Amino acid sequence: MSRKLQGMLAVVTLLLLLHHPIVLALGSSFTETLKPPLLDSPVFSLATVSPDGTLSTASPSTTNMNILTYATPVSMSPDRLWVIGLYKGTVTYDNFVASRRGTLQLLRPEHATLIPVLGGKSGRDTDKYNACKSLGFSWVASEMQSANNEEPWRLPSCSCYLQLECVELCEAGSHDVAICKVVGMQTDNSSNDDEDSGTRGTHLGTQALRSMGIITEQGRVAEQ
């Protein structure tokens, strides 16, 4: 075979290879970005109790609630474990670190109006109980409360309530990561769940909050 023909075959072979799907995939360009992916994460509220007060069934004044989206199950046995991210310098952080307990409440779509109050305000200078009450969500006492087992008050009609006990707290920059054992799980029987219609377990997600303009792409509460 002449050198000229060999050269032509080499060029054709190269062109065929360049158009092969695998080569095209390998040759595709990637753009560096500083923007994380926009996930549709479940929206929770973590209810905690102040270590400085005594919880009373007559007053929820020692309970604080926030908005939390850094939460996920990580193990099923021998204990059911979840991890949550706690933003430092907050009332929730201080309460949880001191008591090592809290109730993780999985919110439903109707709780969306509470996000600016629970997620955009601090419990240090905001009466979150009365703010939620004015929006139609009066906190309710937990049935698990007793003299020796103080539990925070709760929001009504949440999809699920997980009672957490901290097993280990890990430093993670702006947040601490708490590895927690689930010591109790409840649902609110007064919520309008309908198994036949497929609404049972419906929960609020961050994508819905972004669509409603309640939070920004960065996950912060939008200015009202």
Image: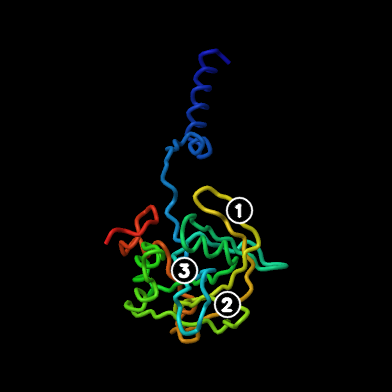
In the image, 27 versus 179, the foreground residue is: 179
Q: What residue is pinned by disc 1?
A: 170
* Mark in the foreground, 3 or 2: 2
Helix, strand or loop under label 3? strand
Q: What residue is pinned by disc 3?
A: 45
Query: Which amino acid is tagged 2?
Result: Glu
Where residue 101 sits in the image (x, y, percent)? 58, 68
Query: Please, which colouring scheme is shown?
Result: rainbow
Q: Is residue 96 visible?
A: yes
**Residue name at image x 55 percent, y 84 percent:** 143
Where residue 177 sits in the image (x, y, percent)? 57, 56
Query: Which amino acid is tagged 1?
Result: Cys
Crowd band around label 3 with a 10 angstrom C-alpha radius: few (<14), some (14–19), many (20+): many
- Return the residue found at the far top: 3
**Residue name at image x 46 percent, y 59 percent:** 90
Q: Is residue 179 above or below residue 173?
A: below
Where residue 91 sits in the image (x, y, percent)? 47, 62
**Residue name at image x 37 percent, y 71 percent:** 127
Q: What residue is pinned by disc 2?
A: 150
Q: CA distance from mark 1 to mark 2?
A: 25 Å
Query: Which amino acid is tagged 3?
Result: Ser
* Mark in the foreground, 1 or 2: 2
Where residue 198 sits in the image (x, y, percent)? 47, 79
Q: Quadrant of residue 32?
A: top left
